[in-house]
Amino acid sequence: MPRPCISVSVARLGSLFFVAGISIWPLSIAQAQVLIPHTPQLSATDMERDGLTVAQEALQLAQFQQFNEALIRAKLAAQLAPQAYEVWALLGGLYLTVSQPAEAIPALNTSIALNQKNAGVYFSLGSAYFRTGAYQDAARALEQGLALRSDVAEEWFNLGNAYLKLNQNPKAIAQYRQALKSDKKFWPALNNIGLLQYEQGDIPQAIRSFQAAVALDNKAGEPKLALAVGLFRQGQVQQGINTALVALRLDSRYIEPDFQRENLWGERLMADTKALFANPQVQELIQTLQADVGQ
């Protein structure tokens, strides 16, 4: 599992923006549609105030899932209030939400240049770097954020993922364990520890990690399927098959090797998964699930 979430949530956008203590009021239709027939001369203070107002409108639009419209307003807000770090944070967060991480990076770096004390912006920057493949930069940004706020299990997990992509497995496991210290019920960290243990050849320990993850969330398909593969590999064939059937019904996306790889499954686990999927019982279910998707 690469990340607990793929996009920046509206709640994260709000947290980035509210940090300055700015209130939000309902965006009226009149506010959004009135056109000013002329452009008066504005002071820098007036422009910043207007920029913050436009940024509030952008956040309101984001709350209604109107992200492209929100992005247009956030860009304007950054032009009007270029010294407002929270506006640049909002703009960067919106770029992440619409899957434009490369565009998010300069906006988030600008926010940090204006204020180095907002942990959430470092976390968003780490996400942007990760999604562009700049894993060393991602790790650095996440570490800076965690130095400001260390109680966020998801960000320790994200840091672990960055180290995993850098092939620094001991460091990755250490960050996953930090995530569990922050939240002992955060099963994705246990899952990814199991992924690394499996690749290191310690399949019995990996099985224990997957079992612990499943115990925390019995509806999570990923650790259940990984557990099934481990059991099958260790000779507990029917138990592995039965577990795989349940796991694939929970999350059929893991049928696809590309999805497994995207979620940081290693070559050893993927090869053993392929062997499990060749079993006639499992293959029958896979064909049924794929047919259902095609309908």
Image (tube, grey):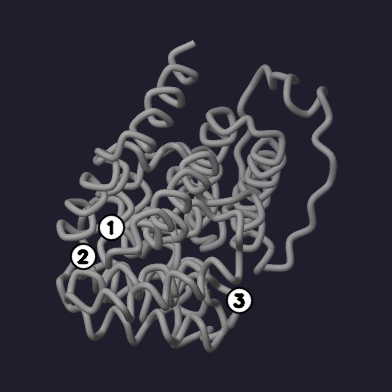
Report how far apart the C-alphas of labels 1 and 2 lie in the structure: 8 Å
Residue 30, percent from left and from top: 82, 23
Report how far apart the C-alphas of labels 3 and 1 lie in the structure: 21 Å
Residue 239 can be seen, yes or no = yes
* Quadrant position of residue 31: top right
The residue where tag 3 is placed is 185
Determine whether the residue tagged by mark 1 lies in a helix, strand or loop.
Answer: loop
Residue 34, percent from left and from top: 75, 20
Residue 15, percent from left and from top: 64, 63
Say which amino acid is labelled 3. Answer: Lys
The residue where tag 1 is placed is 264
Mark 2 and mark 3 residues within 8 Å of each other at the beta carbon: no
Residue at the location (39% across, 56% down)? 240
Residue 114 can be seen, yes or no = no
Q: Is residue 72 above or below residue 126?
A: above
- Along the viewing direction, whichever of 35 and 250 lies nearer the viewer: 250
Q: Earlier in the sequence, mark 1 or mark 2?
A: 2
- Along the viewing direction, whichever of 113 and 163 lies nearer the viewer: 163
Mark 1 and mark 2 residues within 8 Å of each other at the beta carbon: yes
Residue at the location (33% across, 81% down)? 205
Of all residues, the one furthest to the top in this rendering is 295
Residue at the location (61% across, 63% down)? 217
Which of the numbered marks, if any, corresponds to residue 165? 2
Q: Earlier in the sequence, mark 2 or mark 3?
A: 2
Characterize the local packing of mark 3: few (<14), some (14-19) or many (20 or more) Cα atoms within 10 angstroms.
Answer: some
